[in-house]
Image (cartoon, grey):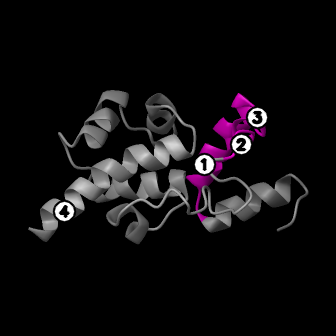
């Protein structure tokens, strides 16, 4: 029974986190190299993402496995930051389409790769 609950939570959470991050299914699919229809099936519960796909998805949404498997909390922060919550109307205006695409790509990198990109841009944490 618990597996069914987790399965349902994952399906619902994928959609909720995608919408909270103001992303389309295509944007998530492109960022994770998952076919858009396959990703749509994850949200609909027709198929379950494998571990590789889940790993990519939690990176894109900047969440933990625990957050993916438990009930979505719309009051929690989005993108790991308290600066931009789903209820903020101006969140979508903060990044251009190009910037959003770049953020999604950077999230897919390892921590070491992210630091190398930051160093190459002359930035610091």
- Judging by the rendered image, the residue that carries numbered circle 3 is 93
Q: In whole angstroms, how far apart are the C-alphas of marks 3 and 4?
A: 36 Å
In the picture, the quarter occupied by the C terminus is bottom right
Considering every residue shown, the one lying at the far left of the view is: 1
Query: Which of the two labelled residues, at mark 1 and mark 3, occupies the earlier sequence position?
Result: 1
Q: In whole angstroms, how far apart are the C-alphas of marks 1 and 4?
A: 25 Å
- Judging by the rendered image, the residue that carries numbered circle 1 is 86
- Left or right, 74 with reference to 112: left
Q: In whole angstroms, how far apart are the C-alphas of marks 2 and 3?
A: 5 Å
Seen from the viewer's position, the closer of residues 27 and 22 is 22
Helix, strand or loop: magenta stretch: helix
Query: Which of the two labelled residues, at mark 3 and mark 4, occupies the earlier sequence position?
Result: 4
User: Residue 58, how many percent across, how many down?
Assistant: 46, 58
Disc 1 packing (10 Å; few <14; some 14–19; many ≥20): some
Asked which secondary structure carries label 4, the reply is: helix
Which dot, 1 or 3, sits closer to the camera? Answer: 1
Q: At x 37% / y 29%, what residue is drawn?
A: 36
Q: In whole angstroms, how far apart are the C-alphas of marks 1 and 2?
A: 8 Å
Q: In whole angstroms, how far apart are the C-alphas of marks 1 and 3?
A: 13 Å
- Judging by the rendered image, the residue that carries numbered circle 2 is 91
The magenta stretch spans which residues?
A: 88-110
Asked which secondary structure carries label 1, the reply is: loop
User: Residue 4, how many percent across, how many down?
Assistant: 14, 60
In the picture, the quarter occupied by the N terminus is bottom left
Asked which secondary structure carries label 2, the reply is: helix
Q: Is residue 41 above or below residue 125?
A: above
- Judging by the rendered image, the residue that carries numbered circle 4 is 5
Q: At x 22% / y 54%, what residue is drawn?
A: 8
User: Residue 101, how many percent across, how many down?
Assistant: 65, 36
The answer to whether mark 1 and mark 2 are in CB contact below 8 A is yes
Disc 2 packing (10 Å; few <14; some 14–19; many ≥20): some
The answer to whether mark 2 and mark 3 are in CB contact below 8 A is yes
């Amino acid at each position: 029974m618990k597996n069914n609950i987790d399965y349902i939570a994952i399906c619902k959470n994928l959609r909720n986190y995608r919408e909270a991050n103001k992303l389309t299914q295509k944007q998530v699919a492109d960022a994770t190299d998952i076919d858009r229809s396959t990703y749509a099936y994850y949200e609909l519960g027709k198929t379950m993402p494998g571990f590789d796909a889940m790993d990519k998805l939690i990176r894109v949404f900047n969440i933990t496995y625990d957050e993916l498997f438990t009930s979505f909390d719309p009051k929690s922060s989005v993108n790991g930051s308290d600066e931009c919550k789903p209820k903020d109307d101006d969140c979508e205006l903060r990044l251009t389409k190009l910037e959003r695409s770049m953020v999604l790509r950077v999230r897919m990198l390892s921590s070491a790769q992210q630091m190398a990109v930051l160093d190459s841009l002359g930035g610091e944490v």
